[in-house]
Amino acid sequence: MVRVRDLHKVFGRGHDAVHVLKGVDLDVARGSVTVVLGPSGSGKSTLLRCVNELEEITAGDIRVGGERMGYRTDAKGVVHRLHPRVVARQRSRIGMVFQRFHLFGHMTALQNVMEAPVQVRGLSKRAARTRAVELLDRVGLADRVDHYPAQLSGGQQQRVAIARALAMDPELMLFDEPTSALDPELVGEVLAVMQDLAASGMTMIVVTHEIGFAREVADHVVFMDDGVIVEEGAPADVLDHPAEPRLQEFLAHVL
């Protein structure tokens, strides 16, 4: 489903340049859950933002569902950025849930979930409403459809954000530390929704520090440090029998 090859991302230029991704290769099978672990500054979030084309890549190749994301190469071998409309179409196939919820404060939960299908996909308000009610029910918020974000807990807001991402019928879901801004007692309700989503066969890449979630739900665990993938494999291997000293050190701090 996702194929990343020799991905580089540099922010800034000259002496101020910061090389955040340094040749990342990653394969994500359709219907699988890949969890990306690593310390702050290791490049995890930047990797997700590159897959979703929120950042232009410096070098490399990203394909989702076989389609090259963001760029094309002409007959002379020159690489060109795709037109913004094409990039927007590609991005619409991918749902992304961020650390912060980014809900529209002046809209109810229902309106937040309806907005993109109506504005971007041209869905009728009636059809969008029906779908939004279904999705809010799926994330356990059937009784909160008319509540505004300020009337919802952090966990409930994040579940609305997940429903909003699902409303575009994505082929791939990206989660960027979706529970790190939540109070500890609210984390479980969001992880339960993600676990249900994984069980339904959604392809997911999840950046998180929730080791229990990685152990129970992930098919593949990736550990990043300093812009590269240091170790990857099945959860039992990576989490219980880490081979690399850097990963052993990281797990000693988070477990």
Image (cartoon, grey):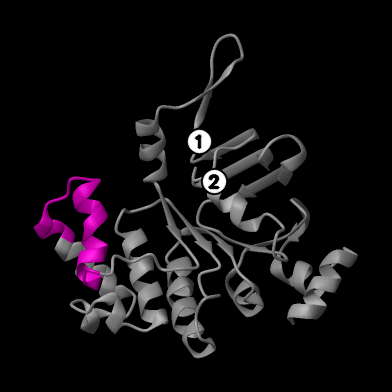
The percent position of residue 218, horizontal first and vertical second, equals 60, 67
Disc 2, SS: helix
Q: Which residue is most to the front?
A: 15
Q: Is residue 123 magenta?
A: yes
The three-letter amino acid code for the residue at tag 1 is Met
Quadrant of the rendered structure where residue 189 is?
bottom left
- Per the rendering, the mark at residue 120 is none
Circle 2/circle 1 CB separation < 8 Å: yes
The percent position of residue 177, horizontal first and vertical second, equals 56, 68
Question: Residue sitting at 15 percent across and 64 percent down?
Answer: 129
The three-letter amino acid code for the residue at tag 2 is Val
Q: Is residue 37 magenta?
A: no
Question: Residue sitting at 77 percent across and 67 percent down?
Answer: 238
Tell me: 185 left or right of 161. right
Residue 210 sits above or below residue 66 on the image: below
Residue that badge 1 annotates: 69
